[in-house]
Amino acid sequence: MQNFAITPIGTVRNDRTDIQHTDNWGAVRSTITVDERFGEACLQGLDGFSHVEVLFVFDQFPEVDDHREPRPYRGRSDLPPVGVFAGRGPRRPNRIGVTCCAIESVHGRSLMVVGLDAVSGTPVIDLKPAMVEFGAVDIRQPEWVSDLMSEYFQP
């Protein structure tokens, strides 16, 4: 397969630095500072949206070479094994994460969001305004996922 390079467009800053602290992201306030190469008006119009999808790289996690074997979710033996594409965790090909966050404010190249599950220093690779027309409907998932994730976005 063809390789490609992605250059980050900005960086996350918040008070979360422990990559092992994986729950309670709901009240985390983050500032995403977009690189100056995009100019001071690069976020213009984003303040008209309530939410933004943030694509980022789990750069502080080691890369894993072999993704062939299903593994218990979050390494928990009480959960069923799942393939690499049946989870949202950081140990995945290309280590790309995506989270839909509430927009708190927009100032120049600074975007303040709430609920971004990325630690401080994380590179951001893209921002997309959340639009109703792109939202999934009738989502179905295993019951154990709801139980497991019940505290993920709790404050």
Image: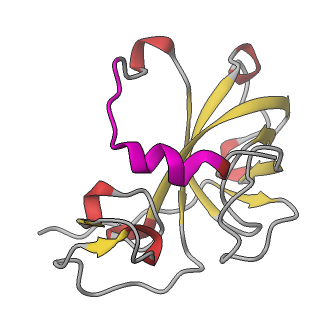
Quarter of the rendering containing residue 39: top right
| Residue 148 drawn above or below residue 80 | above
> In the drawing, does residue 48 fall left or right of residue 4?
right
Q: Position of residue 96 (x, y in %)?
A: 44, 60
| Residue 79 drawn above or below residue 53 | below
Residue under the image location 61 percent in, 46 percent down = 150
Taking depth in this image into account, of 34 and 122 the one nearest to the observer is 122
Quarter of the rendering containing residue 27: top right
| Residue 49 drawn above or below residue 151 | above
Taking depth in this image into account, of 44 and 134 the one nearest to the observer is 134
Residue numbers of the magenta segment: 138-150
**What main secondary structure does the magenta stretch of the protein show?**
helix
Assess whether residue 49 is covered by the magenta stretch: no
> In the drawing, does residue 149 fall left or right of residue 91?
right
| Residue 95 drawn above or below residue 145 | below
Q: Position of residue 122 (x, y in %)?
A: 66, 66
Taking depth in this image into account, of 66 and 110 the one nearest to the observer is 66
Q: Position of residue 143 (x, y in %)?
A: 39, 43
Q: Which colour scheme is used?
A: secondary structure
Q: In the image as oriented, which residue stretches furthest toward the front?
A: 78
> In the drawing, does residue 36 fall left or right of residue 134?
right
Residue under the image location 52 percent in, 48 percent down = 147
Give the number of callouts. Answer: 0
> In the drawing, does residue 78 fall left or right of residue 43?
left
Residue under the image location 27 percent in, 58 percent down = 85
Assess whether residue 141 is covered by the magenta stretch: yes
Quarter of the rendering containing residue 2: bottom left
